[in-house]
Amino acid sequence: MRRTGMALLAALACLAAASPAPAWAGGAPDTGLGHCTTGTAPIVCHFDVAPGDYDVTAVLGGEAEGATAVTAETRRAVLAETHTGAGEYVRRAFTVNVRTPEGEPTGATGTPGLDLYFGGSAPELAALRVRPSRHAPHIYLAGDSTVCDQPGEPYTGWGQELPQFLRRGVSVANYADSGESSGSFLTTQALFPTMLPLIRRGDLVLIQFGHNDKQTTAADYRTNLTALVEGVRQQGGRPVLVTPVVRRWFNSDGTLNNGTALHVNGLGVDLPAEMRILAQDEGVPLIDLTALTKTLVESYGPEASKALYLYNEKRDNTHFSVTGATEVSKLVLGELTGQRLIPERSVRQP
């Protein structure tokens, strides 16, 4: 919804209609900005709410031109940079999963409640509403450091970038954690044992492991993945197996056709191949992210692909930059819609 000039009041009225709270207090519009800092970039807004899912509706824009991007909690991208002209206002809505810890499940607790950061090159926030999202379907993420909500820049997991492409009403709950293998995620209390009872009927659970299964036998890898799949199914959830993203490890011919890039581990186990076979045997949807990221990284080539990873900053050929994580999240989103695992209407159109 785009409005200009004096139509800010109309935008606020629309915002009020989306909120169960009274819109007008003392004859003046309640913009909700009492929860936010002023005169800063980013604009930081805090709500003292319990863990759960929350629908956020924001009116972006102001007297000056604006370019506003929104992140939540631990650097989760929930809205890509949105441009507004001078005197123009747009309403945007999204759903945020609030949990403790707010980022990696075995990491620091973070700040209780819901934190929103309105940044971008010229942030403009006119009004804001937050309300509980009682029945939001979830996309749960089970994975490692290439997926997780990374706490510190420049590291970025692809799961951290996924929420910005989804409309209000879909909640991304990222339980991925740095350093985890298929076995450690299964048994560590803060990970699968904590996530499992939260899964409701129909929720998607994306399962990506391989980077840290360096000495896992084929039998153990299959056993671990099978236990994760069966646990999700017992809760009424829908498991989706996701093969691990490639490492940026080029051959002299400009391809990634080697075991390091494609996750053949120290025991000679081709982990993506094992996952593909298991998906077929168990009738589980598969996102072949190994194949998809191989095509992506090879298309960039040995030099340009450095920007997808943290090679320039850290000489790191495994972990993603914001650019790389965003590109990978788009690949995942394409598979989710292409395989009809989520409806097209759940996707935010640019």
Image (cartoon, rainbow, N blue to C red):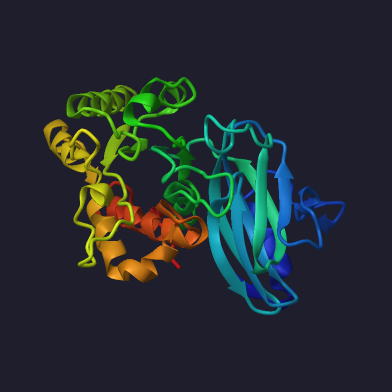
Query: Which residue is depicted at the point 22% across and 43% down?
Result: 286
What residue sits 69% from the left and 60% below the top? 13
Q: Residue 305: x percent and y percent?
A: 37, 65
Task: Report the number of numbered marks.
Answer: 0
Rendering coords of residue 81 (x, y %) = 56, 66
Question: Residue 118 location, x and y as percent?
Answer: 66, 58
User: Does residue 1 show up?
Assistant: no
Q: Is residue 258 visible?
A: yes
Q: Please state which of residues 341 and 187 is positioned toward the viewer in this rendering.
A: 187
Q: Is residue 221 left or right of residue 80?
A: left
- Please give the name of the residue rendered at 68% of the width and 34% of the height, measured from the top-left corner: 112
Residue 143: image quadrant is top left
4 or 303, which lies in front?
303
In the image shown, does 49 or 14 lie closer to the viewer?
49
**241 to 305, vertically: above or below:** above
Q: Is residue 132 above or below residue 297?
A: above
Q: Quadrant of the N terminus?
A: bottom right
Does residue 219 lie above or below 104 as drawn?
above
Q: Residue at x 35, y 36 (%)?
A: 212
- Indicate left or right for 33 with 275 as reference: right
In the orientation shown, which residue stands out farthest toward the right?
26
Residue 93 figure quarter:
bottom right
